[in-house]
Image (cartoon, grey):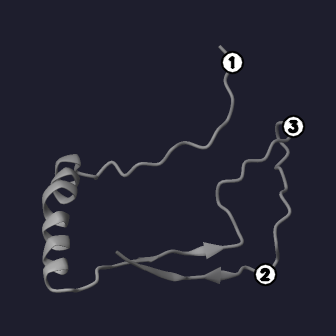
Amino acid sequence: MELHISAPQKKDYRQDAKAVKEWVEITYPAIAKKAKEENAEIYWIDETGVRNASNYIKGYSPRGVTPVVPVASEHILCLPIFFLTV
């Protein structure tokens, strides 16, 4: 068996599968039906953070020598907000 380094898949361990299923199958269809009856629009909004630095880089070097990874000296952060209508 050959092992290699890879980024793990991240999944929130606090997610309640039963609550998600109820939202998808019952709650959201009721909201969509009411919006259609009232000729209304549904807006989905999401905010995310984007930066030019990462915290997941791994470096390799001989034992006892700290690896050096060149990075941008100026950190840039952008917080875009997106919305989508259904």
Write down the quadrant of residue 85 in the picture.
Answer: bottom left
Q: Amino acid at mark 2?
A: Glu
Q: Looking at the image, do the residues carrying marks 2 and 1 touch, with CB atoms under 8 Å apart?
A: no
Q: Is residue 28 above or below residue 76?
A: above
Say few, some or many: other residues with alpha carbon within 10 Å of mark 3 (under 14 / 14 to 19 / 20 or more): few
Q: Is residue 14 above or below residue 86?
A: above
**What secondary structure is found at the residue carrying circle 2?**
loop
**What secondary structure is found at the residue carrying circle 3?**
loop
Q: Earlier in the sequence, mark 3 or mark 2?
A: 3
Residue on which disc 3 sits: 62
Residue on which disc 1 sits: 2
Residue 73 is labelled as none
Spatial separation of the CA atoms under disc 3 and disc 1: 21 Å
Out of 50 and 46, give the one closest to the viewer.
46
Q: Residue 50, percent across and down? A: 61, 74
The residue positioned 51% from the left and 44% from the top of the image is: 9
The residue positioned 85% from the left and 45% from the top of the image is: 65
**Side of 21 where 72 appears, left or right:** right
Say few, some or many: other residues with alpha carbon within 10 Å of mark 2 (under 14 / 14 to 19 / 20 or more): few
Write down the quadrant of residue 40 in the picture.
Answer: bottom left
Can you say which quadrant of the picture contains the N terminus? top right
Out of 26 and 8, give the one closest to the viewer.
26
Q: Is residue 21 above or below residue 51?
A: above
The residue positioned 85% from the left and 56% from the top of the image is: 68
Spatial separation of the CA atoms under disc 2 and disc 1: 39 Å
Q: Looking at the image, do the residues carrying marks 3 and 2 touch, with CB atoms under 8 Å apart?
A: no
Q: Amino acid at mark 3?
A: Pro
Residue on which disc 2 sits: 74
Q: Earlier in the sequence, mark 2 or mark 1?
A: 1
